[in-house]
Amino acid sequence: MTEEVRRCTRCILPENYPNIDFDENGVCRVCREHDQKYSNIDWDARRKKLEKILDRYRGKGAKYDVLVPFSGGKDSTYTLWVLRNRYGMRCLAFNFDNGFLDPGALAFAKKSAAKLGVDLITYTPDFDLLKKVYKRAIETTGEFCAACVVLIPTAIFRAADTQGIRFIAAGFSDMLEAPPPETSYMDRVYFRNMMKGAIPMDELKWDYFFPSWKRMFKVKQINLPDYIEWDLPFIYDTLNRELDFGKSMADVRYDCLGTPHSSFLFRTRIGFGKYEYLYANMVRSGVISREEALKTVDEREPKSAPEGFDEFLASMGCDRSILDGIEEKSVSNFRGRNSTMRRLAIKLREILP
Ligand SMILES: [Zn+2]
C-alpha cells in the first residue's frame, strides 16, 4: 500500500485525499493550511484568556464549576488534571459509553477520577436505540461514526444542562484529531434527514438533538488545547508520574473498539483509512516522525476486513451486504444545513459566553 500511492512528503496524506494538491516540494494543501493556522500563536495571550474564562466560572456552580468530557485517554485526562490541579476548578468528569468503549479505558477513567478527587458519571444510552441509529447510518452513508458525531456532543451538553453546569471544557484537539471535513462533515440537519422514516424523531429527541439554541448558548464550551500548548511528551510524563497512565507516545490507541472496523469501512468507501489521516495529523504536529507513521499505518490500517468484522456488523443487525455499492454512499447524499448557516452557528458558539 505505502509503495504505490503518492504521499505528501511532510505528512503522509495520499494523493486520493479529497481536493489535495502538492506544491513543488511535494507538500500537501492540508500541511500548508496547518502552517498558516498554527505558526503564529501567542500562547501567553491564549493562557491569559483561559484564566479569565476560568475566573468567570470558578465557584459559580452549585457543586461543580465545569463538566469535563472524560474518556480516560491522554487528552481528556490531562484536561481534567490541569483544571483540577493547576486551576482549582471543581470538576465533574463525564464518561460516555457508545456501546463499544474499551473496558480498559473505563477502568482507567474510574481509577484516575478517584486519584484526582473528582466525581465521575458514566452515561450508557440503551443499546437498542444506538443499534438502530448505527445500522441506519452505516446502511445509508457507509459511515459508522456518523451516529456518535451527533450523539456525543448532545450527551455532553445534556449532562451539563441537567446538572446545572454552565461551562464545559474538553480535551479535543482540532489539530490532532479532527477528521477531514471533506469526508466526515455532519450536522443535525443531515442527521435528521438521514434518520427520517427509519426511527421516530421522538425516540431520538433527547440523545441526538439540542433542546434549543437559547438554552445551548447558556453553556460555554471550550477545548483546552486551543488555549495551552499541547506538549505531548510533557503530557505523557505528567500522566505517567501522577496517575500511572502506563502508556507512551508510541502507543496510540483509540478507546472505541469500533475504530478498526470503522476505518475499514471508510477505506473501502473513500480509498484511504482513518488511521492514515489521524497519523498524518500527528506527523504534521511533530508528535511522531513520518517514518513511524508510515510503519504504524502499514501495521494497523486494515486492508481487508479486520478480525471480528462480521460480529461487529451483527451486533448492529447488519451484515456484509452493506458493502455493496458503499462507494456511492455518503452523508452528503442527504440535505444538510446550508454553509452560511453552518459558519454562522460555529461563529456564534465562539463568541457567546
Ligand atoms: Zn501533508
Image (tube, rainbow, N blue to C red):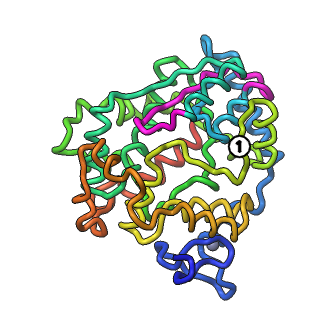
Which quarter shows the C terminus?
top right
What is the three-letter code of the residue carrying label 1?
Lys
Q: Residue furthest bottom?
A: 24
Q: Does residue 101 show up?
A: yes
Percent from the top left, x then y, of residue 267?
Answer: 42, 66
- Tell which of 97 and 260 is nearer to you: 260
Which region is colored magenta? 84-103
Query: Which residue, as the protein is rendered here, is positioned at the far top?
Result: 62
Query: Is residue 88 inside the magenta stretch?
Result: yes
Instruction: State which image quarter holds ligand 1.
Output: bottom right
Q: Residue at x 76, y 36 (%)?
A: 239
Mark 1 highlights which residue? 247
Q: Is residue 34 left or right of residue 322?
A: right
Q: Residue at x 30, y 53 (%)?
A: 138
User: Measured from the top left, where is residue 119 in percent x and y?
Assistant: 61, 17
User: Residue at coordinates 50% horizontally, 32% vertically from top-left?
Assistant: 217
To which quarter of the image does residue 279 belong? bottom right
Q: Which residue ends up furthest to the front in the rendered image? A: 307
- Label 1: how many residues lie within 10 Å, few (<14), some (14-19) or many (20+)? some
What number of labels is visible?
A: 1
Tell me what residue is drawn at x 73 percent, y 30 percent: 81
Q: Please determine whether, in this image, residue 91 is positioned above or below residue 324.
A: above
Q: Does residue 193 appear left or right of residue 38 in this picture?
A: left
Q: Dot 1: what SS? A: loop
Residue 329: x and y in percent read: 28, 63
Where's residue 45, x and y in %?
A: 80, 45
Q: With respect to residue 168, does 256 lie above or below?
A: below
Judge left or right: residue 2 versus residue 302: right
* Residue 193 is at least partly visible in this image: no
Out of 304 and 280, give the one closest to the viewer: 304
